[in-house]
Structures are given as C-alpha cells and as structure tokens.
Image (cartoon, rainbow, N blue to C red):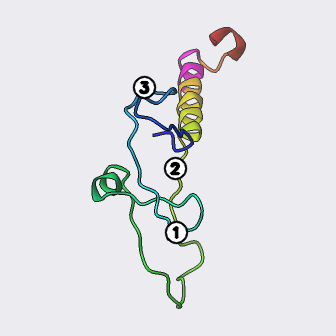
Amino acid sequence: MHHQIREDKPGKCPICGMTLIAVQKNPELIKDGIILSDQQVQLGNIRVDSIGKGKIGKKGDRLYDLYSEELNNAKQEYILALEKEKILDHSIVDFKQLV
C-alpha cells in the first residue's frame, strides 16, 4: 500500500491500482491523526505494544523491523544481477544494456 496517497473520494491507487480504503479522522487526535478499523489494522499487519522503563537487552538485539518497498525491489534487482554475473562466469556486465 502507498500511504502517501490521499484522495477525497473513493477510487484506485494511482500507483498500483489497489482500491483505496477510507479512514476516519479523529478530532481528538493531533492534526492529521487517523483511526484504523480492526480490519485495517489486520490487513496492514500493524502490531503495537506499550512503552515502559527497563533494560533493552544485550548489545546487538533488534529494536524494530523496517520495511521499504523501494529497498526490497533494489535488493531483488541486485541479487538478480549477481546471479546473471555468475551465469556469465564473472564476465563484465554492462548494466546499462540490461535496462
């Protein structure tokens, strides 16, 4: 989903064509705050937890996960380029010609 897309009427996402989901604004929240339904939270795979004081754990423990569609696409393109280079027996690959 492309969270940056905002429309004032029902329709499709101009980027991917997915049906846009209506969200309700809550006047009690800060400006531009939103409330998601239980279904929207489930579809978005959104998980929340309470913040509290305490030790985080050992050095190197993961604090959070971050997903970026653009980064994931770039990773897949890089892996594909490495596989093509291996198939070509480490020959020089001109990436400009691949596009």
**SS at mark 2 in the image:** loop
Q: Earlier in the sequence, mark 1 or mark 3?
A: 3
Locate the N terminus and report the quarter of the image it occupies.
top left
- Amino acid type indicated by mark 1: Leu
The stretch drawn in magenta includes residue 85: yes
Q: Are marks 2 and 3 in contact (CB under 8 Å)?
A: no
Residue 58 percent across, percent down from the top left: 55, 81
Left or right of residue 87, residue 23 in this image:
left
In 3D space, how far apart are the residues under numbered discs 1 and 3 (Cα atoms)? 30 Å
Furthest residue toward front: 27
Left or right of residue 7, residue 21 in this image:
left
- On the image, numbered disc 2 is attached to which residue? 67
Residue 80 percent across, percent down from the top left: 53, 25
**SS at mark 1 in the image:** loop
- State the predominant SS element of the stretch in magenta: helix
Q: Earlier in the sequence, mark 2 or mark 3?
A: 3
Q: Tell me if I can see residue 12 in this picture.
A: yes
The quadrant where residue 92 appears: top right
Q: Nearer the viewer, mark 1 or mark 3?
A: 1
Q: Magenta residues? A: 83-88
- On the image, numbered disc 3 is attached to which residue? 17
Q: Nearer the viewer, mark 2 or mark 3?
A: 3
In 3D space, how far apart are the residues under numbered discs 2 and 3 (Cα atoms)? 21 Å
61 vs 74: above or below: below
The stretch drawn in magenta includes residue 8: no
- What residue is at 58 percent from the left and 37 percent from the top? 70
**SS at mark 3 in the image:** loop
- On the image, numbered disc 1 is attached to which residue? 29
